[in-house]
Image (tube, rainbow, N blue to C red):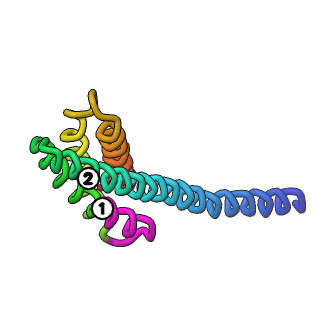
């Protein structure tokens, strides 16, 4: 009889410990997804800032076709900064800002990609934009939105 009681107590304790550990693992996984998204947004913001300045210089040199990328990089940078700030603290509007950020990154990345073959700065911006888009979409998918 004592053996059964001890076994039952041990089993209950093991199940309780396993149940308590599961939410922690989920929280750690959640935090990793949010952290990766925030880092990708911050990195993309910096790449867009650099590319925007680069493209502004190209426009000043007479390459007016880069005016589009000046503007897309500026707006993308702004959205990435907002997304990075909100997602880093797991704010209640993370889904909203990441939806907008993913779309902005897709558009900006596509615009920069058109010039990437001949321009390393724009190639880097396009890569960062596409990585940020993927990170935002992964966060949205993970959060069920």
Residue 122 located left or right of residue 139: left
Nearer mark to the viewer, of 2 and 1: 2
Q: Which residue is mark 1?
A: 95
Give the residue drawn at x 32%, y 56%. 49
Q: Position of residue 119 (x, y in %)?
A: 29, 34
Residue 14 in view, yes or no: yes
Residue 144 falls in which quadrant of the image? Answer: bottom left
Q: Say if the magenta span includes residue 90.
A: yes
Observer-nearest of 79 and 32: 79
Binning the other alpha carbons within 10 Å of mark 2 as few (below 14), some (14 to 19) or many (20 upward) gives many
Q: Which residues are magenta?
A: 80-92
Give the residue drawn at x 32%, y 67%. 82
Q: Which residue is mark 2?
A: 52
For the residues labelled 2 and 1, the Cα–Cα distance comes to 26 Å
Q: Secondary structure at mark 1?
A: helix
- Which image quarter is the C terminus in? bottom left
Observer-nearest of 39 and 68: 68
Q: Position of residue 121 (x, y in %)?
A: 33, 41
Task: Tell me, for residue 109, which label it has, or none.
Answer: none
**Magenta span dominant secondary structure:** helix
Observer-nearest of 92 and 11: 92
Count of marks overlaid on the render: 2
Binning the other alpha carbons within 10 Å of mark 1 as few (below 14), some (14 to 19) or many (20 upward) gives many
Residue 103 in view, yes or no: no
Instruction: Give the residue at the far left of this rendering.
Output: 64
Residue 78 falls in which quadrant of the image? Answer: bottom left
Q: Secondary structure at mark 2?
A: helix
Q: Position of residue 95 (x, y in %)?
A: 30, 62
């Amino acid at each position: 009889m004592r053996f059964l009681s001890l076994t039952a107590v041990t089993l209950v304790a093991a199940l309780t410990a396993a149940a308590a550990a599961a939410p922690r693992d989920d929280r750690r996984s959640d935090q990793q997804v949010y952290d990766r998204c925030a880092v990708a947004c911050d990195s993309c913001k910096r790449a867009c800032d650099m590319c925007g300045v680069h493209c502004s210089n190209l426009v000043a040199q007479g390459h007016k076709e880069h005016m589009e990328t000046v503007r897309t990089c500026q707006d993308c940078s702004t959205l990435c900064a907002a997304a990075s700030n909100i997602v880093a603290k797991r704010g209640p509007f993370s889904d909203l800002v990441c939806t907008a950020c993913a779309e902005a990154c897709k558009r900006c990345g596509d615009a920069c990609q058109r010039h990437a073959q001949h321009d390393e700065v724009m190639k880097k911006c396009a890569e960062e934009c596409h990585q940020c888009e993927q990170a935002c979409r992964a966060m949205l998918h993970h959060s069920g939105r």
